[in-house]
Amino acid sequence: MPAVQETIDQVRLIDVDQYKYGFETEVEMEKAPKGLSEDVIRFISGKKGEPEWMLQWRLDAYKRWLTMNEPNWARVSYDKIDYNDIYYYAAPKMNPSPKSLDEVDPEILKTYEKLGIPLREQEILAGVEPQNRVAVDAVFDSVSVATTFKEELAKAGVIFMPISEAIREYPDLVRQYLGTVVPVTDNFFATLNSAVFTDGSFVYIPPGVRCPMELSTYFRINEKNTGQFERTLIIADKGSYVSYLEGCTAPKRDENQLHAAVVELIALDDAEIKYSTVQNWYPGDAEGRGGIYNFVTKRGDCRGKNSVITWTQVETGSAITWKYPSCILRGDNSRGEFYSIAVSNGKQQVDSGTKMIHLGKNTTSRIISKGIAAGKSENTYRGLVSAHRKATGARNFTNCDSLLIGNQCGAHTVPYIESKNATAVFEHEATTSKISEDQMFYCQQRGLSDEEATALIVNGFVKDVLQQLPMEFAVEAQKLISISLEGSVG
Amino acid sequence: MADVTLMKTPAETALVQAFESAKTALPGDGESRAQAFEHFAQQGLPHRRVEEFKYTDLRALLREVAPFAGTPSAEEAKAALAGAKALAGVDALQVPFVNGHFVRDAVDFHALPENVEIVPLAEALANGHDWLAKLSPVKWANDNPVYQLNTSFMADGVMIRIAGPVEAPVHLRFVTSATSAVATATRILVVVEEGASVTLLETHESTDGANHQPNDVVELIAGDRTNVQHVRVNAEGNKALALSTLAAKIGGEALFNSINVTAGAATSRHQVFAILDGENTNLRVNGTTMLKGTQHGDSTLVVEHAAPHCESRELFKTVIDNEATGVFQGKIIVPHHAQKTDGRMMSAALLLEEGGAMNNKPELEIFADDVQCAHGATCGQLDEDLLFYLMARGLPKKEAESLLVQAFLGEALEFVENEAVRESLVGTVEGWLKARA
């Protein structure tokens, strides 16, 4: 029945158009010349006032990158990216490195206000109880425009600042850890990032310190024709704890914009890092025009014994997602966790998952992944669990579920399970199913509309993941999920 | 790097030479062979960067290409078959092959059971035959380099037509008997007509000590309402590199039950490509693999639910001793229209000793929204509590292990319908465990 199909398509159209962070901010920007060359890299490095070793590091990465090929194994398809048609650096002209909020362009402050990101410490203090305070690093295109609670965090010994600042102020610390988890040569996009990364956050938690508040970075792409290449480095020294949140949005545009980030986490003995992401980049329109290409390398290294790294992600945005937050479980008794909800709509393509690499003794990992495909989207879970010869007593449990809404989307699961140790115990299970008619009927009988019922059931389905999110995020994520699913009920 | 042409390995060069010198002598239409070989030669031997061969790097494993075996004399064939042991006690219609060549004399064409027709493939290829058009029924196999090699070099085989119910099993017995390494390429086509039923047995044996390289393909076209029970036994010699493919296209309301039992060969890879082509069909593909020493055993599986309302069950059990390596790669494909599909795939592996390795890749590719698909994979050692329980009751450790392994593998074997065959397979498992102790 073609008419019905048309109606469904109409509804879907509304769905993707609901992206509410798609506005643009008019700010005068300073940009590097278009394209990628050694000169552009020198320009970026110069803008950031970097030491010579950092520039050399970038140039080496660039040389290496020139010899590499874009990976094509993921289940995503897109037109070839012209890497010379992108601005690699764009910063607000007014004051690229403001000392306080008063120096920040009011337009930018308005932008964050609109996005609901609190940049003024007193505003956060008012109304919310002190335990729930969040320190924010706000990255606008290629620069960090504000970082809150720096002084208070410094009192606890916690370093939280833009990475470009950290390279200047704590060069030894950065040099010791940068590129040790995701090597410069790791993969095409990570190498590109190493050459041109502009900003991102640097976090160092000293031994025995429990970070007094949640840390967060909010990434905003604003300028046309730019790519965002941020780099985040988090080091949790012995016995410390930190919870870090990341959020991201971008304006609605017909062009595709590239976001190629690298995130490195290092947990030393008995340390714990909790890294949560709500990824809400512009997903493109119903016809698949525009949207962010989110090609991200995220990896955590449980370097010390008894260390813990937890990745939690809620993925609803981006035209294409290519992202595998991973854990290298090097320290004995270390633990890696991955909780993910990936919702795809319209013509979005998601190829995401995780890697748990067991190297140390008695290391454990857990993977809970929920994929929801609607519209004409493709949603792939791709994951690796491996135990090396010496990973005695390694354990993994994986559970990945996929849900399809409508019959024009696809859900795929590609797990790799490799064990080289007899004492390692790996269990993997996965299912793909439709929303149960019984459940729908039950909800509808109680007066819920189709859409409300679907949202409710899906929220139940992803409950496992939401429980892992910090409080503020869980609320936000639930909203996100209901947005993404509205209109999808076929 | 994309534009770099890789140097041909000695084995690849040898294959090119072998094809050049053999192509005129091989029976039948040279063109389809040449096409298949060209496809193969463009890619070369698959290596670990080729996703489907990620865990079985044929470029590294196949260093030297053995010469293709010639036709054995009547005496040689007789002697070879006399020594064959696999499923020997099972009463069946024997269709034997020695060194990859069909042994005509061993089959009484005038006294074939009712509903069975057999056509020797070499003759059919040479003289032409209607059924040849039925070859290559499964598209997923066509791009596979192992299959392409078989198509290029296939020298002999049979085409079997099952027209109705057939009582006694049909036993395809492959024996390679040569002191120095030989390569073989056989092709079997089995066409099971609508409503027919048959039990197909397939056994593969070769002499120890030589690096034999069999590459066998069995193709099955089963019509609507058919019932096909298929049992394959790999009892190849300890140095063999055995490649095999089962390509099956199954009609509606049919039953197809296939099991592969591997204990032989230094390196083996059994590939199953199945298409469920009609509604309400039931497919079961099982595997039982026992590996020891430095053996490498690969089970690769692609099942496409091309029609709605089908059910598939895949259960693979692998036991790995010493420093052996097991591989399971499974993929269930459900296209948009295959609603109400019910697919379940499970791979379980036991690592008995330090040093072994298991690689699992149970994949799902789903485009239909009203389906149930599940896949699972486990990997680990024997449960210590269970071992303790048995040992507390006075069983020596090895015996307790054997009992648990037997139970573990037995789960996949219990679906074999033919009792004599099932018992023989259980005997194979027991023999393997006894040799271990």
Image (cartoon, coloured by chain):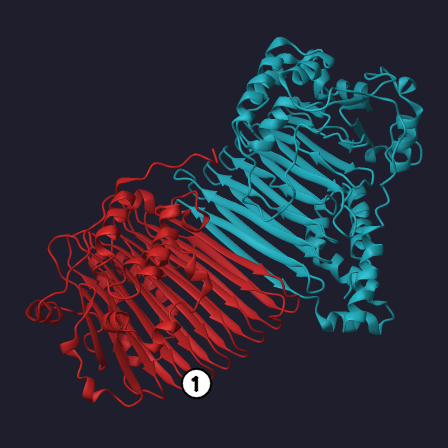
Which residue is painted at 58% across and 13% down in the image?
A: A56
List x then y, in percent, for residue A312: 67, 43
Q: In which quarter of the image is the C terminus of chain B?
A: bottom left
Q: Is residue B257 above or below residue B20?
A: below
Task: Classify mark 1: residues with Cα within 10 Å, few (<14), some (14-19) or many (20+).
Answer: some
Which residue is painted at 85% across and 15% down in the image?
A: A99
The answer, for residue B63, to whether it is visible in the render is: yes
Q: In this view, does B328 lie to the left or right of A34?
A: left
List x then y, in percent, for residue B5: 40, 36
Front-most of residues A352 and A266: A352
Chain A color in figure: cyan
Front-most of residues A370 and A126: A370
List x then y, in percent, for residue B365: 56, 59
Q: In this view, does A121 lie above or below A343?
A: above
Q: Is residue A156 above or below residue B213?
A: above
Front-most of residues A75 and B140: B140
Chain letter, red in picture: B
Q: In this view, does A426 lie to the left or right of B68?
A: right
The answer, for residue B391, to whether it is visible in the render is: no
Q: In this view, does B356 lie to the left or right of A433?
A: left
Q: Name the residue under label 1.
A: B194
Q: SS for tag 1? A: loop
List x then y, in percent, for residue B126: 25, 70
Instruction: Tell me the subunit letter for badge 1.
Output: B
Question: Count of labels shown?
Answer: 1
Which residue is painted at 62% across and 47% down in the image?
A: A76
Which residue is painted at 32% across and 65% down in the image?
A: B217
Hey, what amino acid is under mark 1?
Glu
Residue at the outermost top position: A52
